[in-house]
Amino acid sequence: MSPSDYHFGIRPNLNQFVHQLLQVFFVGLTLGMTRTVIPALAEAEFSVPKGSFLMLMSFVVAFGFVKGSLNFVAGRLSERIGRKQVLIWGWVAALPIPAMILYAPSWNWIVAATVLLGVNQGLAWSMTQTAKLDITRADQRGLTIGFNEFAGYFGVAVAGVVTGYLSISFGAREGLMLFGTAVIILAIFNSITSVVDTLPWAKAEAALHASGLGAAHKPRYPKNISDHPTTKEVFTLMSWRDKRMFAFSQAGLVEKFVDALIWVFYPVYLYNQGLSLASLGWVVGIYGFVWGGSQFFTGPLSDKIGRIKPIVWGMWICGAGVAMTLMAQGILWWSISAAVTGFGMALLYPNISAAVGDIAHPNWRGSAIGIYRFWRDLGYGIGALALGLVGHFTNSIEMGFWFTAIAMFVSGSIVMIWGEETHPRINPAQE
């Protein structure tokens, strides 16, 4: 097929777009099943001593470093063997996770299961995002990432609520085993039978750009990189050589401090305040539901007003929501603060990815997204380690909340100073 035979946009590729959304929903369910029950019952079920903040955070540290590294590998690998094959490998890696949780004799098994979860997330979630960017248009990137992250974090929220109830009905380990096994098997079946490799679309887009037949508004691609760059070239460009990419990468890293906090400290804090597992699941779920649902609005918003404003506003609102958690008591207040945090995340999360996609050339877009996601998900590990150290040295879980809120305000300010509008219609490249 010639490059002109490939059609770009959500509508011409609706069937494949829906299957990719279903895949990221499954990825979110797999992540979400570990986010309510395991932290809350770490002491009772897995013998984690009370107040052992570093030990409690160890599984998130492992997850962050593994997922970040696999994002990097997945992006580069997908440009050689295709998006679909990497996606399937991600699901195969997840197969042992439910059984490991069921039979775990100690917390070390939970850490090991989380390493496999990091492999699954790094390979599978990266591919769902990259694949949808391959087949959609430049003016749909905010909407595309919004749909993608809605599906993923709606899955996280659903899993948190459902596993809370399953744990009450069947027991913590048994509930997670039933849920996890069903999700992973369905995901493997769908990825093999229904997902199409989208690498040919990326190659066709690159050929159209080279021939001058690409989009009407040319993006401000970085100048200081070759047409077919090495891994080192793309990595250094994303990490520090391009100040825009640096601003986006550091923002992605810091915003994961919030997710690490929500993953571990939030359930422990609320459980210690007397909430049941079911109520806890709903409060944490509100964060995920608002984050996911709001992206139907915040993704398209950036297609109209640009990426920078939603990113900066989102960083600051998200930080404010984290700080609000400690300012009053009660399930209603905690639900409101969770919703504020989730809305801030919805503003920043899809739009950082869309900004990277705007100015990453199709020839190396998979690598660029993989490296951005490497830095972003490394934030799980760095954030969890930092939160564990803060909790350890202050002997206070509350100080972790203040640390996270301050980090978000500082990071948002860096984006405001060093970031640049990337939307090709609003800030096109000058010929």
Image (tube, grey):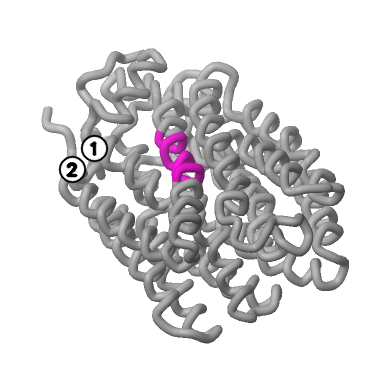
Above-or-below relation of 273 to 359: below
Q: Indicate the amino acid at tag 1.
A: Arg
Query: Which residue sits at x=30%, y=18%?
Result: 211
Q: Quadrant of residue 390?
A: bottom left
Using the numbered discs, state the Cα–Cα distance from disc 1 to disc 2 in whole angstroms: 6 Å
Residue 142 x %, y %: 38, 50
Residue 304 shown left or right of residue 103 in the figure: left
Residue 146 visible from this viewpoint: no
Indicate the secondary structure of the residue bearing disc 1: helix
Q: Is the magenta region chiefly helix, strand or loop? A: helix
Q: Are marks 1 and 2 in contact (CB under 8 Å)?
A: yes
Residue 353 x %, y %: 39, 44
What's drawn in magenta, residue-wise? Answer: 372-382
Residue 91 x %, y %: 71, 37
In this rendered view, identify the residue nearer to me: 10 or 225: 225
Residue 140 x %, y %: 38, 47
How many numbered circles are shown?
2
Mark earlier in primary sequence (1, 2):
1
Q: Read off the residue under disc 2.
A: 418
Query: Which residue sits at x=24%, y=26%?
Result: 241
Give neighbour class at mark 2: few <14, some 14-19, many 20+ (Cα, 10 Å): some
Indicate the secondary structure of the residue bearing disc 2: helix
Residue 105 shown left or right of residue 329 in the figure: right
Above-or-below relation of 146 to 94: below
Residue 256 visible from this viewpoint: yes
Q: Indicate the amino acid at tag 2.
A: Trp
Query: Which residue sits at x=68%, y=43%?
Result: 111
Asked if residue 73 lies in the magenta stretch, the reply is no
Q: Read off the residue under disc 1.
A: 244
